[in-house]
């Protein structure tokens, strides 16, 4: 049944907000992005 499968998947779900401090970097430590990146999609 679909509900059973969703329950099984929820048991393995990890909320990224809970582990963000372990897997993310401080934005101040990131190198600056170039203003014009070749191949980047156009932003409107």
Image (cartoon, rainbow, N blue to C red):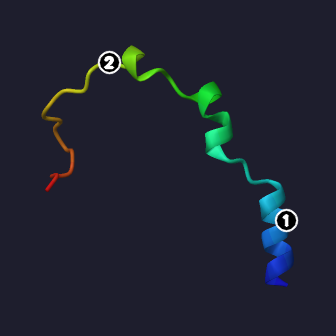
Q: Residue furthest bottom?
A: 1
In this picture, residue 3 sits left or right of residue 32: right
Q: Residue at x 86, y 76 (%)?
A: 4
**Does 38 sit above or below residue 44?**
above
In this picture, residue 25 sits left or right of residue 11: left
Q: CA distance from mark 1 to mark 2?
A: 40 Å
In this picture, residue 31 sits left or right of residue 6: left
- Image position, residue 27 (x, y; %): 40, 23
- Image position, residue 31 (x, y; %): 32, 18
- Asked whether 39 or 16 is in front, the reply is 16
- Image position, residue 34 (x, y; %): 18, 27
Location of the N terminus by quadrant is: bottom right
Location of the C terminus by quadrant is: bottom left
Q: Secondary structure at mark 2?
A: loop
Report how many numbered discs are placed on residues in the image: 2
- Asked whether 37 or 26 is in front, the reply is 26
Per the image, the residue denoted by label 1 is 8
Q: Residue at x 17, y 52 (%)?
A: 43
Per the image, the residue denoted by label 2 is 31
**Does 43 sit above or below residue 38?**
below
């Amino acid at each position: 049944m679909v509900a059973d499968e969703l329950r099984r998947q929820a048991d393995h779900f990890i909320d990224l907000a809970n582990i963000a401090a372990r897997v993310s970097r401080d934005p101040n430590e990131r190198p600056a992005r170039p203003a014009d990146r070749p191949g980047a999609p156009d932003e409107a």
